[in-house]
Amino acid sequence: MESKRIKWGIVGLGNIAAKFASDLLLVENAQLNAVASRDIEKANEFAEKYNALKAYDSYDSLFEDPEVEIVYIATPHNSHVELSIKALEKGKHVLCEKPMALSYKDAQRIIEASKKYNKFFMEAFWTRFIPSVQDVLEKINSGVIGDVNYINADFAFHGSETENKRLFDKELGGGALFDIGVYPLFLSYIILGKPKEILAKAIKHKNDIDLQTSMILQYESGQSVLHASIVSESEMKAVVSGTKGRIELNAPWYVADGYTLFKNEEKEAVVTLPTLGIGYSHEIIECQNCILNNQIESKLWSHQNCLDLSRIVEEIKMQIGLNFF
């Protein structure tokens, strides 16, 4: 017997939505039912390209579609809270692009709505589900590199104010921290948990968003040195060091196709674990499995995980004097 098809809707049809939709086509029992953009022409083009059955010129219309079961929200950061809550109210499950909210308080509101309406919600931290990260976590948890005492990770690229307007737009929640800084913070959190202390410094744009932010997370017996920038490039490797060895995730580490394990400064293993498609497919599969099992959260990236990370980001936001509102 063929297993149940999960019917998806996508709101906000920019670059990330296009990547997501291309991966959705690779996932068994996933169907793109509807897409929505304020520009109907754009919605129709997107629908045709990615085999969506319907195109809408408003997000509300998609939320009202009785056939859509789960909505992927890929709009700019500043609209995530309102749209996630609205979709949950309308009885839809939600996968919301990161960051789910620009404040801890708003992140709490979304989680409360998920519980109130008994609908699945997950922040779209696709990196959590890619095979190499899953395998690295397993290795770390089984003690292969001993006790982790140092993590070094960054996410940096040279953005342009003309080509990447959204990144530099304060009203849309732009800047390095919320757009890409959440990735290295996420890596530190899934390996070492909540830090005891955080130190953060930023270089700001004239409109007050952060162009680059450096962060040190202090733990009982370890530290994470992390960096995010939208004005400079980096190698984008991630190194996790322990008392018995270290693991280097291939660049770009947030979608690594493998890693290298070192013991006594010598390569012990080179592991290759490619993603299915671009890599979004793994979080899509996780969402579908949770929905089919009547879960309102993922065990791998739970409501509490979302809130913990949001609180860490909030502390850094305060330290660097970032204020969107």
Image: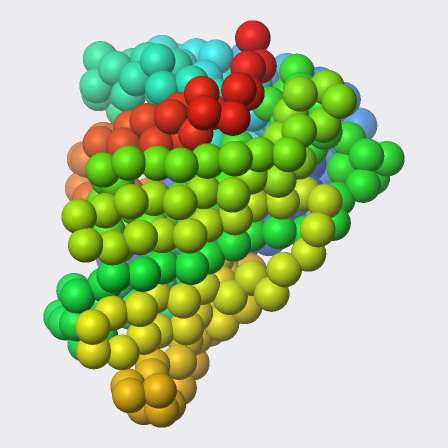
Q: Is residue 274 left or right of residue 61?
A: left
Q: Position of residue 224 (x, y in %)?
A: 36, 52
Q: Which quadrant holds the C terminus?
A: top right
Q: For the view shown, which residue lies furthest in the left direction?
A: 142
- Foreground: 39 or 233? 233
Q: Position of residue 313 (x, y in %)?
A: 41, 30
For residue 105, above or below residue 256:
above
Q: Is residue 53 left or right of residue 133?
A: right
- Foreground: 228 or 255? 228
Residue 135 quadrant: bottom left
Q: Is residue 307 left or right of residue 244?
A: right
Residue at coordinates 28% horizontally, 86% vertically from top-left? 263
- Foreground: 271 or 144? 144
Q: How many marks?
A: 0
Residue at coordinates 31% horizontally, 53% vertically from top-left? 223
Residue at coordinates 25% horizontally, 15% vertically from top-left? 112
Q: Is residue 322 left or right of residue 112?
A: right
For residue 132, above or below residue 33:
below
